[in-house]
Image: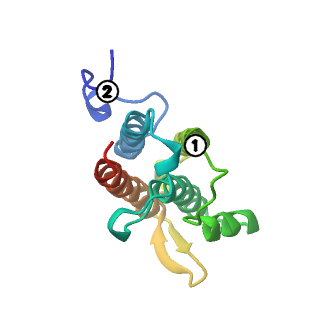
Amino acid sequence: MNNLTKPEVWLRGALPDVPALLQPIAHALLQAQEEVQELMAGFPENLLWERPADVAAPAFHLQHLTGVLDRLFTYACGNALSAAQLQALSAEGKADERIKVKDLLNAFDLQIEKSLAALKQTDEKTLTETREVGRAKLPSTVIGLLTHAAEHTTRHVGQLLVTVKVLGR
């Protein structure tokens, strides 16, 4: 059964081992994963860095989807970003013809898996605990960061969809 005939992820029931309060976040991430995979199937490599109307390139969105999830889940765990995460952040959106669609999709899939694993390990009792975000140490909470991870992911999937459609795909 392809994704067009399946109900959206949130209508397929609870996900095993994901705490009840985190189900919507897991559903949103899995829905985004399915939509990105379908949207990018057969996408031409030569369009990956194209920026129609000067909007972000498809490659940027794919890099950013992966990177933001990694960073927000790091903050939700109460950790600061590593040097590798900061380096990946600075590389987001910089055209590199060596990067292929399949590599970006594989990285996104791996990050979704890591994010789901982290959700399964999250104790619901910690959801209102304060967490600091970024170098400025702005205040948030575990649930705030996890919810923003899902919201931000869906926002960029929408932007990716429009960019891919404008590119004629």
Q: Nearer the viewer, residue 160 or 120?
A: 160
Q: Is residue 109 left or right of residue 38?
A: right
Task: Using the numbered discs, state the Cα–Cα distance from disc 1 to disc 2 in whole angstroms.
Answer: 19 Å
* Quadrant housing the C terminus: top left
Q: Residue at x 45, y 60 (%)?
A: 57
Mark 1 nearby-residue class (10 Å; few <14, some 14–19, many ≥20): few
For residue 112, above or below residue 167: above
Expressed as whole percent of the image width and height from the top left, the position of residue 85 reads 68, 63
For residue 19, above or below residue 86: above
Q: Is residue 96 left or right of residue 32?
A: right
- The answer to whether residue 49 shows anywhere in this view is yes
Q: Nearer the viewer, residue 103 or 154?
A: 103
Q: Residue at x 37, y 45 (%)?
A: 21
| Disc 2 target residue | 13
Mark 2 nearby-residue class (10 Å; few <14, some 14–19, many ≥20): few
**Disc number for residue 109:** none
- The answer to whether residue 81 shows anywhere in this view is no
Q: Earlier in the sequence, mark 1 or mark 2?
A: 2
The quadrant where residue 58 appears: bottom left
The quadrant where residue 35 appears: top left
The local secondary structure at tag 1 comes to helix
Expressed as whole percent of the image width and height from the top left, the position of residue 64 reads 51, 59
Q: Residue at x 57, y 58 (%)?
A: 67
| Disc 1 target residue | 121
Give the residue type at disc 2: Gly
For residue 82, above or below residue 13: below
